[in-house]
Amino acid sequence: MSLIVQKFGGTSVADLDRIRNVARRIAKTYDQGHNVVVVLSAMAGVTNSLMDMAYKITDSPAKRELDVLLATGEQSTIALLAMTLNSMNYPAKSLLGCQADIITNTAHGNARILEIGARRIKELTNQRQIAIIAGFQGCDADGDITTLGRGGSDTSAVAIAAAIKADTCEIYTDVDGVYTADPNVCSKAMKLSRISYDEMLEMSSLGAKVLQIRSVEFAKKYNVPVHVKSSFCEEEGTMLVDEDSDMERLVVSAVTHNKNEARITLKNVPDQPGIAAKIFTPVAEAGIVVDMIIQNTQPGGLTDLTFTVPETEFNKAMEIGKIVAKKIRAGEVMGDKNIVKVSVIGVGMKSHSGVASKMFSTLANENVNIIMISTSEIRISCLIEEKYAELAVRVLHTAFGLDKE
Amino acid sequence: MSLIVQKFGGTSVADLDRIRNVARRIAKTYDQGHNVVVVLSAMAGVTNSLMDMAYKITDSPAKRELDVLLATGEQSTIALLAMTLNSMNYPAKSLLGCQADIITNTAHGNARILEIGARRIKELTNQRQIAIIAGFQGCDADGDITTLGRGGSDTSAVAIAAAIKADTCEIYTDVDGVYTADPNVCSKAMKLSRISYDEMLEMSSLGAKVLQIRSVEFAKKYNVPVHVKSSFCEEEGTMLVDEDSDMERLVVSAVTHNKNEARITLKNVPDQPGIAAKIFTPVAEAGIVVDMIIQNTQPGGLTDLTFTVPETEFNKAMEIGKIVAKKIRAGEVMGDKNIVKVSVIGVGMKSHSGVASKMFSTLANENVNIIMISTSEIRISCLIEEKYAELAVRVLHTAFGLDKE
């Protein structure tokens, strides 16, 4: 008998029929003798429409109150699922974030989990009851409702799994696992049966939407075995596990691409100490996360400074760039949204050389020009023109031996 | 400076525009220097559609979970109103039933308030903040969400007013006060500027939907001055107050009618001790509330036993009636839904005689036959054929001097 956390996303609980399917899946696990703890998202679309309603009132709804509003989404699904299981004669009880003692800081809209008491979860599990917990939400020390940000239910599930020392945390979603590349772009993409926490972290931060990045951090920190699988079929998905020697046989595990990037260049920046801080401090203060930065100093003391930001922040970042350029007597400010970041990821890189040169030459063979490069221990990313995105993913996928068959 | 509780019903918060109107009304009271505590219902229709969803899952949804689901209705409106007030630069914070320490028993769906801590309400009020509290909901000793039954927000408001010793509790609704009769039936009905708690209790139990009956019980018990008024106009409404000598000048304060009654007759019941218990015990066990009962024993030891039940329970009650009749060897069971209960109410009756005879003769003058009669200290009710309902209300209204002008 195992203790299993099962998390179902918004598309899995999108209507009463799907909720019934979810109930059947839970019942099956329960009937196999396992203890099940369930974590749910809101019905697909509900969080967005609640958000829309709030933004009809004001451009900047009070964050505390937005959390109270958004939290109703998960509250509804846990009640509906508990009712469904009860009507099938399974003992199940819903618990709100607060009732499950999911204690967070007070950063409404993007709260961090500080601690999970889980007293009531354990009580229910000990009574062979199915605890059904609202994902995405917690409460702060004052008992005020907080939410964990988009995709926060994943984090709820993994954190709960860690707190109750679950044997496994199953994340049911609308994809059936983690792929070596986006299957919509690369028809030869393979589903990975296993992936290391670190690789998944890189993939999440590169825009793979399979798991919220913080859930992967939690999984890594507490060594929670996470199983990503589809709620619409019975197939095995992808296991997130600790890195092992076996994994290093594959040098590269996946190729990702992220079109949600935009590039901004400040031309002819005076090359003085402290100039970078003058540029990036106002950007950071505007809450814009800068991804890649390159600085290319010309002879003569002037430099071109280029950085990338999420495409959604492009207009704001351009405005700030222009103000700063004027202040520091730099030249023109240029922007470009038609770019894509293509990355190869693999823990095997740590012990293999030649990955970068292989990546560059593969792209060069297709006449794809590389605009910027950034790397981590287990990742190499190249910024290229957006029109080459699909081509680049496919040739890299082939070059690193990831094509199926 | 007063401490004022303002409660707004479902039609008053039915959409974002109306919520804005409510916010303006609250802001006005706040700007006059008063401290305001707000209690809200769910948007009109929301509770019903949540209920429908639950009943699509099963005929008997788990009550604990139904409460979790229904509680989202008020949770949404308090968040939206708090956001609206915040966007108008008024300090406001929402509180769920649980956060406001509205402690109830565990009778999910029809919970009774045991205690109101109100620590956070008082804290907010002391800081000149507007506390916006979810009506209809509380939580039990385990921290599980409970709801107070239909119209429960009225009870929340009055109970909170009692707990924080508010100077007045304003109930904003879609009618502009309490009338001497239903204005849809009796064009000469007058709005009462004041009514005693006891009269209002009788009116509520007779089906007047202005206030949930338990809210009136609370108001009477804790002597809370309740002001029922319209949220759509500025007119004065009706004050619920303790009975005073002034009131007794009017013998009758109101004429009510309730069409939601049905009559069941068991013919030729053997007139034996204990027979009534044999009939009414199974009815009570089915959760059916019997209103009027008459027994009319004929010479020869057989009796006809007639009672009334809510029309919604008619079919169930008929079934039980037939089973019981067979068991106790009674005769035919007859039912009639085409009846109405017409009542006259007034604290003045305590000190005036002749009210009953005036009522009977007024009805007799119009050839209205009285089927059953029941009375309390301040009420006389007659069951008559439903087709005479409007006529009866109008002639009684005139006879007791309630017509306007």
Image (cartoon, coloured by chain):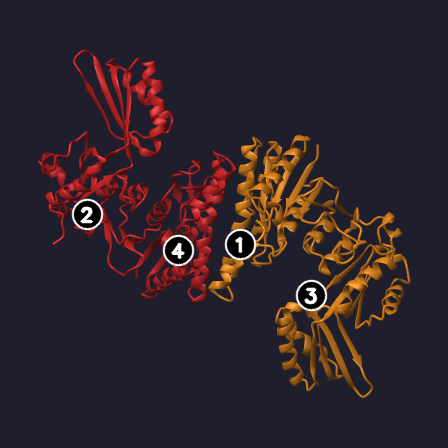
Chain colours: A red, B orange
Q: Which-is-in-front pick, marks 3 and 2?
A: 2
Marks 3 and 2, Cα distance to the nearest angstrom? 67 Å
User: Residue, x 57% and y 58% (percent of image)?
Assistant: B109
Mark 4 and mark 3 in contact? Answer it, CB < 8 Å. no
Q: Is residue A380 visible?
A: yes
Asked if the residue at tag 4 contacts the one at tag 1, i.e. Cβ–Cβ closer than 8 Å, the answer is: no
Which amino acid type corresponds to the residue marked 2 in the rendered image? Cys
Question: Rounded to the nearest whole Å, what is the CA distance between mark 1 and mark 4?
Answer: 18 Å
Q: Residues within 10 Å of mark 2 (few under 14, many from 20)?
A: many
Residue at mark 4 shares a chain with residue at mark 3: no
Residue beneath the point at 37% across and 25% down: A285
Q: Earlier in the sequence, mark 2 or mark 4?
A: 4
Residue identifier under label 4 = A13
Q: Are marks 3 and 2 in contact (CB under 8 Å)?
A: no
Q: Residue at x 75, y 81 (%)?
A: B273
Percent across and percent down for residue B379 are 81, 61
Contact, CB < 8 Å: mark 2 with mark 1?
no
Residue type highlighted by circle 1: Leu
Mark 1 vs mark 4, foreground winner is: 4
Residue nearer the viewer, B387 or A125: B387
Q: Do badges 1 and 3 share one subunit?
A: yes
Residue, disc 2: A186
Asked if residue B114 lies left or right of residue A165, the reply is right
Q: Which residue is labeled 1 in the image?
A: B70
Q: Residue furthest bottom?
A: B300
Percent position (x, y) of residue B94?
A: 55, 40
Q: Is residue B342 above or below residue A55?
A: below
**What amino acid is found at the position of numbered circle 4 in the picture?**
Val
Chain of the residue that carries numbered disc 2 in the rendered image: A
Which one is closest to the eye, mark 1 or mark 3? 3
On the picture, is A361 further left or further right than B22? Answer: left
Q: Which residue is mark 3?
A: B260
